[in-house]
Image: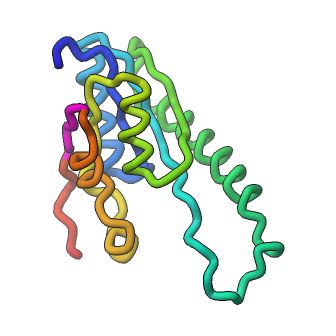
Amino acid sequence: MLPIQKIICPTDFSDPSFKALEVACELALHFSSELLVIHAVAPPPALTTGHISPSVFDIPEFLNKMEESSKKLLEENVAKRVPKGISVRCMVIDGHPADQIVETAEHENADLIVIATRGQTGLKRLVSGSVAEKVVRLSARPVLTIGGPPTKE
């Protein structure tokens, strides 16, 4: 595992994911590693109710706008939160977050994934499960999980 040359840090723009980014930055500075900060744009849930016509809801256009706004938000946060002197790249990926994080880590030949254990909360977490848990389970790469503050769920 050592030396750590490439670190992937996913973010969902939550406070816990920004805490994980802080840790990833410290490691990147210490090891002079490249940092890849990624955000996954999850596909919208299937429109199965029959109340919304696909012609009314343009899914490709919606996803395109989501990607554009996510890329802008990602770049703004990286510029604000990643110290100068760190080699950093931003990437917005499409698909289910855990699967895409693991796939990106493999494709990029990452040495480490740094991920927050808490991002989504409440009903969103119940429906989607914990992305961090899935990443730990699916990844062949080392995963450093960063716990967030206790929640009142």
Q: Position of residue 105 (x, y in %)?
A: 37, 32
86 lies above or below 52:
above
Q: Main secondary structure of the magenta part?
A: strand
Image quadrant where one finds the C terminus = bottom left
At 46% from the left and 37% from the top, the residue drawn is 38
Label total for image: 0
On the picture, is 98 further left or further right than 149?
Answer: right
Q: Residue 47, located in which quarter of the rendered image?
A: bottom right
Q: Which residues are magenta?
A: 141-146
- Residue 60 is covered by the magenta coloring: no
At 71% from the left and 89% from the top, the residue drawn is 51
Image quadrant where one finds the N terminus = top left
Q: Position of residue 64 (x, y in %)?
A: 71, 50
Q: Residue 146, located in which quarter of the rendered image?
A: top left
- State the residue lying farthest toward the right: 55
On the picture, is 5 further left or further right than 143?
Answer: right
Q: Nearer the viewer, residue 151 or 123?
A: 123
47 lies above or below 17:
below
At 24% from the left and 17% from the top, the residue drawn is 4
